[in-house]
Image (cartoon, rainbow, N blue to C red):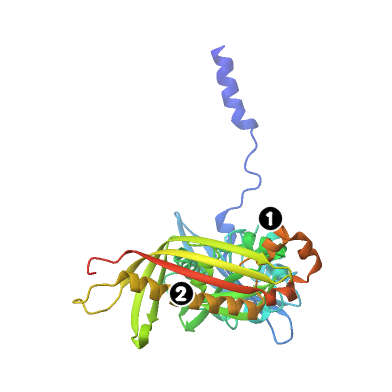
Amino acid sequence: MKKMVLLILVMIPLLLSGCWDQRLLVNRTLVNGISFDLTKEGKIASSVRALNIKSMGGGQFELNDELVKAERPTVVGLGLDLDSTIAGEIDASKAHVVIIGEELAKKGVQPLIEFFYRNRDSYIASKIVIGKGKAKEILSVEKEKSPIAFVILQLIEGAEKDTVIPRKNTFTVWNNILDPGIDMVLPYVKRIKSDKVEIAGVALFNGDTYTGETLPKEKSSILLLMTNQLDKLNRMAMILDPKGKRQSISFTVRNLTRDLEVQVDKNNQITCKIDLNLDIEVLSFPQEFKDPLNTKELNQNLSNELTKQAKEVTDTLLEANCDALGIGRRISSYHHELWGKINWDEEYRNVRFEPNVKVNIIKTGILF
């Protein structure tokens, strides 16, 4: 009996199938960043940043970071062209960053996103960003220690935690495109030096089309707070000018409560009221130390300034025809009859926004 059991244990591994679909690392070229641009001839130019892994023997590998380009009338076939110019099997399953040039984004990003969303080998968590100027120029930045795609990824993740840009990837962007009741905003990046890239704010969209309007980092933070998207924290710095006395202050938003109400009157005038309550920690506020800090007055001054800036943000959204707050979604849900009669793309411009921000200082540091 024991011999029979032993024989079975020996035979089982021989009968099991091996890894028939294995893909060896040394046979692949890993794409970590992709860019798309519109050429002067109206074609789509794509560049990929790829890591070519070469075995040196003895468990040692050599990594080469290269930039490869291709151009076609449409996005279809670009992958084949890129694959034919790269040694080994091209693998885009770890393409962490996809950068779309602003001129191409104005034509609509749906075909580009669909290309990644439908491909089973694509990385559905790829960060989608809009690049100022040519996206290729951003992806071609040289870094000594790390491929630029990884540097951009770190910048994006840091800005997400600071509530400067929204968390957007292939999956969420595709869902936004399919939802007529809300418009998306995407991270906006630019190249500022030959070897430096920075997060510049957010790009405003109408449907899948980039409107050409952006919000700088200071205003994009306020927009995210109005959309109830406070992440780990949010740091801000601004100049207060109460009674002609300029004062600089920096603070961190620690907690957020938002109330958004959409009202429709008998004339079908749509009004959106946004109430924000922010608990903040003051980081820096230069003043005469002999004077006690008037917390009540500072709360009011900050509330007034942030309310003013929130109104500037909503004015920019109307100008860009970007429904980033999802007012259309509220109308379709609670005023279905009205939603069926109006052209939301035209009616949105008539929405009245009434933002109101109330600040509550919960911590001032050891010096105050």
Task: Single out the residue that lies furthest toward the right.
Answer: 341
In terms of depth relative to the viewer, which is nearer, 250 or 93? Answer: 250
The percent coordinates of residue 257 (x first, y second) are 48, 60
In the image: residue 282, left or right of residue 154? left
Residue that carries the numbered disc 2 in the rendered image: 306
Disc sitting over residue 120 in the figure: 1
In the image: residue 236, left or right of residue 23? left
The percent coordinates of residue 245 (x first, y second) are 33, 86
In the image: residue 338, left or right of residue 100? right
Task: Single out the residue that lies furthest toward the left.
Answer: 290
| Residue depicted at x 61% and y 26% | 11
For the residue labelled by badge 1, is the local secondary structure a helix, a strand or a loop? loop
Q: Is residue 207 above or below residue 119?
A: below
Q: Mark 1 or mark 2, which is nearer to you?
A: 2
The percent coordinates of residue 210 (x first, y second) are 66, 76
Mark 1 and mark 2: span between their CA atoms?
A: 45 Å
| Residue depicted at x 61% and y 76% | 317
Q: Few, some or many C-alpha atoms within 10 Å of disc 1 (few <14, some 14-19, many ≥20)?
A: few
| Residue depicted at x 51% and y 70% | 356
Q: Quadrant of the C terminus?
A: bottom left
In terms of depth relative to the viewer, which is nearer, 150 or 361? Answer: 361
- Residue type for callout 2: Leu
The percent coordinates of residue 329 (x first, y second) are 68, 62
Ranked by sequence position, the earlier of labels 1 and 2 is 1
For the residue labelled by badge 2, is the local secondary structure a helix, a strand or a loop? helix
- Residue type for callout 1: Arg
Q: Quadrant of the N terminus?
A: top right
In terms of depth relative to the viewer, which is nearer, 273 or 204? Answer: 273
Q: Quadrant of residue 118?
A: bottom right
